[in-house]
Amino acid sequence: MSAIKLPTGFQTAGVACGIKKDNKKDLALIISDPLSDAAGVFTRNLVKGHSLKWTMKKYKSNKIKAIVINSGNANACVGPKGDEDAEKIAEITAKLAGCNKDQVLLGSTGVIGFPLPVEKIESGLKEACSRLSSDNSEDAVRAIMTTDTFPKEVSVDINLSGKKATLYGMAKGSGMIHPNMATMIGVFLTDAFISQEMLQKALERAVNKSFNRISVDGDTSVCDMVIVLANGNAANEKITRENDDFETFAEALEKVSVTLSKMLARDGEGATKLIEIHVKNALDNETAHKITNSIAKSPLVKTAVFGHDANWGRILTAAGYSGAEFDPDLIDIFIGDLQVCKNGVGLSFDENKALEILKKDEVKITVDLKMGSSEDIMWTCDFSFDYVKINSAYRT
Amino acid sequence: MSAIKLPTGFQTAGVACGIKKDNKKDLALIISDPLSDAAGVFTRNLVKGHSLKWTMKKYKSNKIKAIVINSGNANACVGPKGDEDAEKIAEITAKLAGCNKDQVLLGSTGVIGFPLPVEKIESGLKEACSRLSSDNSEDAVRAIMTTDTFPKEVSVDINLSGKKATLYGMAKGSGMIHPNMATMIGVFLTDAFISQEMLQKALERAVNKSFNRISVDGDTSVCDMVIVLANGNAANEKITRENDDFETFAEALEKVSVTLSKMLARDGEGATKLIEIHVKNALDNETAHKITNSIAKSPLVKTAVFGHDANWGRILTAAGYSGAEFDPDLIDIFIGDLQVCKNGVGLSFDENKALEILKKDEVKITVDLKMGSSEDIMWTCDFSFDYVKINSAYRT
């Protein structure tokens, strides 16, 4: 996962069309040649953005030529006009890309409740078409960013029965991040040859271990989606069942997803560090997840980590109100490799050692329930002054 | 609810015994004469503090002479020594107050994982006994405060079939506040004559409409409790069933509880204002509560209110991921009396009017689902820089 590379047959562009201020990039275009199969996972928020709804209707039953994603405006909660605008943008893109409007997927992220400036997007799409490139994906990644502080993309090569394929992923955060899912858009592109059904299966498996395991602030946005396009260019034997090639592909997708997810958590709004929460030896997976989730959401845990305060009582407290079943008199808690609580009782630990661990830019919290053999891992970030600063005046 | 008055037969004291720094008051003593019946509601956190556990064992089966509450140390997660310390403090108090140790209730709030300084508390209790007073409850209220910025107490007179009784309440917040319940201690005292069973019934009803309807940060502490003592001094006809006197008493208890709860929310850590969230016309109570709860917990809503940003999209988003059933195309949202969203679509409202509403120290958010006739109200506070400041270095 070092040098970023697009799979064969994909081109991208990212331009500034004037939705965001200060001439920042706000419109990404992705073109697939040949057409791709698509799989997707979407927000479970009852309220759904108009661009998202368009994509949910189209991704499964059509071969996909293009993805258009704008930032700066969520195209959400604007009534019938939001749906009409989505359709218009698909039509404009289809005309430019030489395809059917149903072969265009859409994503929008940003502020809720304002109509999209369709004319600006039309001009932007024309410019994007003239800038399509197979080796400058970063422009597109920058164009989907909102409050992200760095672009997030990654690629890996995989070997499918002797044929080389590439898997590329980009993602944006960084507030409203919580399962399932977040103000979070992820796009994966691959030239692997795989059926839509297997692609969907691999994506769901990967998302469950990655994007659904990160939390920034417990809020789930109305525009979240992860899309994967597979154009088959690698000419491997088509993956149509759960064979070795499927495992290779699914594992690569999970690995890329986890890498992007950790980047998202690390870049949570105002975050100064990545926190990994590992609950082990739980009675079952659900118990383990309830506890990782409760700790990952606790503002008291997150502010303590920001302040380098080894306040393990807040970790135990969050476990206690998680609704999970465990014996408080068995629990062990570790901050990094420093044990701070044994059998539910605080240890007198070396505060300097704790401070040293908490000052690092990655902090691992381990909770050992000593009751079973199930585990769960989640990633979150600390809660800083800047989280409040960013979110107290986002819209204005 | 103006001049604060203790009911007849109760005396209180608050002293500084050296648990907190800077000679701040940290030990409260309440004495009941004659002995009281007691009712209580306790944290649902699986982890429970040692003082709390003592009280849970004793309050129902004993007539109560005294309550001792210390701040600065939660007496939680310190192993068997925590239970022994609780018992010791009850014994010391019993000796000083001339009662049985089982007639002493305990509360502790503060940092988790450190043993109580029992000798300091013993000296403090002696001093408190010498300072008992029937007209200086504020000392006791100050002694139970942690990060609270102002003392919270209230009293009302009630008429029970021609006899005057008084109901007094004190409470402390102010972090880890979320149903059910919070780093929250509430003590009610009354001279009304009422059976333990009816007292418990009235308390549970009141708590459900008040302390279980506030949220500061979604964290539920291990030491929360609300206790009510009734010594019968008012000599009214004993309340033993749900008659008119019971209704009078229960309504007064609810009113006092709501007043204290709103004070707690307003004084949430770092809060600059009180936010009231009112969901109406829901299909059922559970739906309404899921939505108030989701909005009350959303850091994005709370930071927006702090920044005077009428970001109603975040309110709708929080409703959408609450798990409640509603039709997003019917929903209306009001900030104060200003409608910002109609039938799920944003209105172009007067931003200056919105700013004026959001600058007040109480902000009301109303969500009208237009689907049924159930409603729910919760209180929370905004999320400020100071929340992060207070909680990033609480322990150290």
Image (tube, coloured by chain):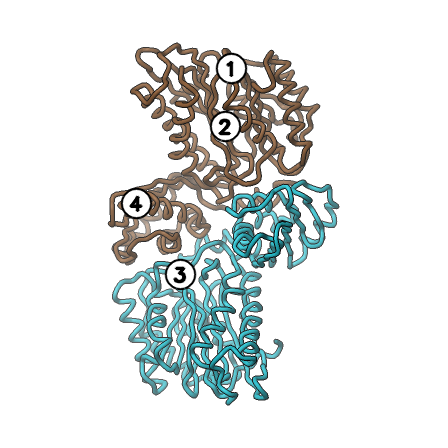
Chain colours: A cyan, B brown
Q: Which residue in the protein does label 3 denote?
A: A44
Instruction: Determine the image quadrant of residue A42.
Output: bottom left
Image location (x, y in percent) of residue A211 = 51, 64
Q: Position of residue A15 (x, y in %)?
A: 44, 76
Q: CA distance from mark 2 to mark 1?
A: 22 Å
For the question of whether residue B269 can be seen, the reply is: no
Name the amino acid type tagged 3: Arg
Left or right: B195, with B103 as reference point: left
Q: Nearer the viewer, mark 2 or mark 3?
A: 3
* Numbered label attached to residue B151: 2
At horizontal 45% and vertical 70% (from top left) the residue drawn is A226
Q: Which residue is the site of mark 1?
A: B32
What amino acid does circle 4 point to?
Answer: Asp
Between residues A142 and A39, which one lies in front from this camera angle? A39
Disc 2 sits on a residue from what chain? B
Q: Secondary structure at mark 3?
A: loop
Cα–Cα gap, marks 4 and 3: 22 Å
Chain containing the residue with disc 1: B
Could you tell which of marks 2 and 4 lies nearer the N-terminus? 2
10 Å crowding of disc 1: few (<14), some (14-19), many (20+) = many
